[in-house]
Image (cartoon, rainbow, N blue to C red):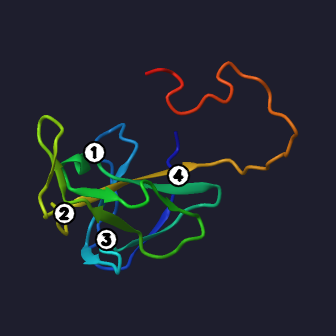
Amino acid sequence: MKPLRVKIKRFVADAEIPRYANPGDAGMDLVAVTRSFDEFGNIVYGTGLGFEIPEGYVGLVFPRSSNCKKDLFLTNSVGVIDSGYRGEVTLKFKPTDLRCDKWGRINRQNKSFPYEVGECVGQLIIMPYPTIEFKEVAELSDSARGAHGYGSTGK
């Protein structure tokens, strides 16, 4: 498969170009070059990078699996980098200040364990997406599941 060429710009000299940690990985590591706080108390990590994602593609920013060791949640769960965005890619995390013991009981620690500048703070996946055109109808077709929603599988 031919690689997709994506233009990238370093806004700061020490910004690290995203790379795959292992062959076959879907996500490329994003490394923090700055850490600050916004007016809502979120920890904001700057990557120092901007991308020119081709039209018809989207950049998706996910937390790393190691985020389970942190008292942080990526505020928008998955970040979306649209093809027209040319600014710095940042990740905003909400500190939870919660820890669970091995029995699942929540303990308030009043401290979070943030990432440090220089650490991988997220992962980037760039992928194509379809352009959607909705067609309004009076009825939707039947299916085995129907309108059964949350918890409908009984699992």
Examine the rendered structure and indicate whether residue 11 appears above or below residue 78: below
Q: Distance between the residues labelled 2 and 3?
A: 11 Å
Marks 4, 3: nearer the viewer: 3
Is tag 3's residue or tag 1's residue first in the polypeptide sequence? 3
Report the residue at 19% width, 69% height from top: 117
For the image, the number of numbered tags is 4
Instruction: Tell me the kind of residue under disc 2.
Output: Pro
Q: Residues within 10 Å of mark 3 (few under 14, many from 20)?
A: some
Q: How far apart are marks 4 and 3 (CA)?
A: 33 Å
Q: Pick the residue in front: 33 or 106.
A: 106
Task: Please name the residue that numbered disc 3 is placed on.
Answer: 42
Q: Residue 98, position in %: x, y? A: 19, 54
Label 1 sits on a secondary structure element that is helix
Q: Which mark is residue 65?
A: 1
Could you tell me residue 31's position as x and y percent?
Answer: 27, 63
Mark number for residue 46?
none
Vertical order, 46 against 70 (above or below): below
Q: Which mark is in front, 3 or 1?
A: 3
Specify whether 47 is left or right of 119.
right
Q: Distance between the residues labelled 3 and 1?
A: 20 Å
Please tell me which residue is depicted at 62% across the width and 28% down the height of the picture. Answer: 148
Q: Quadrant of residue 56?
A: bottom right
Quarter of the image with the C terminus in it: top left
Q: Which of marks 2 and 1 is in front?
A: 2
Q: Disc 1 and disc 4: Cα gap in Å?
A: 25 Å
Question: Which residue is identified by label 4?
Answer: 4
Q: Do the residues bearing badges 4 and 3 touch, measured as CB atoms within 8 Å?
A: no
Residues 72 and 21: in front is: 72
Nearer the camera: disc 1 or disc 4: 1
